[in-house]
Amino acid sequence: MNRKTTLTFGIVFAVLFVFVPLSFSASGKSGKGSLSVSKSADVDRKAPRAQIENKFGVAVIIGNRNYKSKDVPNVDYAISDARIVKKYAQKTLGFRPGNIIYLENATQAQFNSVFGVKDDCKARLHSYMRKNKSDVFVYYSGHGAPDVKTKTGYFVPVDCDPSTVRFNGYSLKTFYDNLAKLPARSITVVLDTCFSGGSEKGMLLKHASPVFIDVKNPLLTMKNACVLTSSTGDQISSWYPAKKHGLYTYYFLKGLQGEADVDKDGKITGGELHNYLSNEVEYMARRLHMRDQHPQIMGSGKAVIVKYK
């Protein structure tokens, strides 16, 4: 992209969205704990640079790949996703490196320490806030799962047993409730996960079918908040093996590169980004995997996410 980019971070999305060199390799013994990425994708090499620093903005970026239970499949591209999103958070969205909370293979205790617990939001993220000055950006790649009894969603920390996720997962309701209590100027959440209990490598819950979860999200009533998710509550979020990324994350980054600016007015809104993601992700999920995957947007779609000069 030849155009210089400037970020206007108003009402944006929570892509409840630290990067490494553009091409990286982390190797070890083959198997559940290994990570190997030998060839970088186009999105890894072309992060547009913001001209305005988001001085008080705070980002939380989590990639959960290596699950401790042998019954829980790994999320192959979660860490490569998180690393490249961190790069875009710094270069394209303008976040200061010191204002990015970055976690790989986060445990339940780490979720609690960052986002807080039920009825107490004053955890690490809250402590980074400057009242009415901080834009919050949250990105997560990893497993989600439902509590079958209550049909509510949970993030799956790497030390979680999905069959008892109500006790050792991190509640999606608590997550949204605590974000809504932050004294933030804007909140953007990007989730490349599914809460149906399914995954690319099979079901997290044995002898169970995908479950449609019920989400009560207080962010939806806020004018300065937007949530972008990779699929509906009963679908699987696909991978893009040729690009070594989650399918949704890959096109999210392509959108930030300028592909989502369909009307060529020099800016990208949450709605434009969602429309772009819907078109590309739905098509490629069908083409690559012969399955339906419908990205979702909740909250405001009018906020400008990126402005180009």
Image (spheres, rainbow, N blue to C red):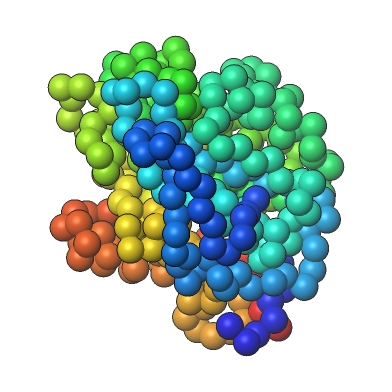
Q: Position of residue 133 (x, y in %)?
A: 82, 49
Q: Percent position (x, y) of residue 235?
A: 26, 44
| Residue at figure coordinates x 32%, y 48% from the top left | 237
Residue 279 left/right relative to 38: left
Looking at the picture, does residue 25 appear above or below residue 212?
below
> Which residue is rendered at x = 56% and y = 37% of the image?
104
Residue 220 appears in the figure: no
Residue depicted at x 80% and y 63%: 53
How many dots with numbers? 0
Q: Quadrant of the N terminus?
A: bottom right
Q: Position of residue 207 (x, y in %)?
A: 15, 22
Query: Which residue occupies the extreme front position in the image?
Result: 29
Quarter in which the C terminus is drawn: bottom right
- Measured as percent of width and height from the top left, residue 71 is found at 29, 23
Tell which of 40 and 225 is nearer to you. Answer: 40
* Res 175 seen here: yes
Is 248 on the left-hand or right-hand side of 180?
Answer: left
Q: Nearer the viewer, residue 277 or 244?
A: 244
Q: Residue at x 82, y 50 (%)?
A: 56
Q: Is residue 133 above or below residue 262?
A: above
